[in-house]
Amino acid sequence: SQQGEEDPQALSIQEGENATMNCSYKTSINNLQWYRQNSGRGLVHLILIRSNEREKHSGRLRVTLDTSKKSSSLLITASRAADTASYFCATEESNYQLIWGAGTKLIIKP
Amino acid sequence: KAGVTQTPRYLIKTRGQQVTLSCSPISGHRSVSWYQQTPGQGLQFLFEYFSETQRNKGNFPGRFSGRQFSNSRSEMNVSTLELGDSALYLCASSLADSAGELFFGEGSRLTVL
């Protein structure tokens, strides 16, 4: 399969709570990226973490990478209604091709 | 700096027809990738062009083709359209030689009747 695996498939939380979504992959990678997609729109790059990095922060986002478990997590703290979107992880393989996860649909309830 | 521009944004075709979608990358970006997105299959990689050469290709039939021009603009063509080709087609450009960070357009939504 071309896709990695993300879980959960869908997540619904109250505004202000933290949201965590996970991504697993199968092969060694150069980097792992997270993207956000609002309904029916293009994807927006959120953060890139290289294979030799273990944690990265950007504003309310925190990404971890565990290459031994071939997994990554994206944490969004203090969620807002505007965070409602689908979130995708993508892993860059050695041939520079990106392999995409199926996405996590996040709903923030006011 | 202008973003990635895709045209047309919406189009309706009938089975058997062909369609051409256009993508203008961010100025200076030499890599352009195309993706098909459907509710059932998620984001599927079609192909990637770098400096007018197809560098990577996904698992799509030969009805799907693309090209890149010397100004980095890219087109993709789908011939003999099938109902299952209805999807959002996304174009992304990047600056780096490697995949790096992708900048996506808003997509072209194709409906095949």
Image (cartoon, grey):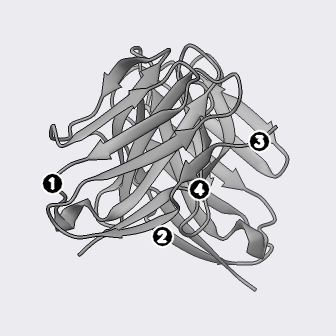
Q: Residue at x 53, y 30 (%)?
A: A66
Q: Which residue is mark 2?
A: A10
Q: Quadrant of residue A81?
A: bottom right
- Marks 3 and 1 sit apart, C-alpha to C-alpha, by 33 Å
Q: Residue at x 20, y 49 (%)?
A: B79
Relative to B63, does residue A92 appear above or below in the rendering? above
Q: Amino acid at mark 3?
A: Ala
Chain to which the residue tagged by mark 3 belongs: B
Q: Which residue is mark 4?
A: B106
Relative to A34, does residue B10 appear above or below in the rendering? below
Q: Amino acid at mark 2?
A: Ala
Foreground: disc 1 or disc 2: 1
Disc number at residue B80? 1
Q: Nearer the viewer, residue A72 or B53?
A: B53
Q: Nearer the viewer, residue A25 or B6?
A: B6
Quick one: quadrant of the C terminus of chain A?
bottom right
Foreground: disc 1 or disc 4: 1
- Marks 1 and 2 sit apart, C-alpha to C-alpha, by 35 Å
Of callouts 3 and 4, the N-terminal one: 3
x, y percent for residue A55: 70, 31
Q: Nearer the viewer, residue B52 or A59?
A: B52
Foreground: disc 4 or disc 2: 4
Do the residues indicated by labels 3 and 4 lie within the same chain of the protein? yes
Q: Which residue is mark 3?
A: B2
Do the residues indicated by labels 4 and 2 lie within the same chain of the protein? no
Q: Is residue A97 visible?
A: no
Do the residues indicated by labels 1 and 2 lie within the same chain of the protein? no
- Marks 4 and 2 sit apart, C-alpha to C-alpha, by 23 Å
* Residue contact between numbered discs 3 and 4, judged by CB atoms under 8 Å: no
Chain to which the residue tagged by mark 4 belongs: B
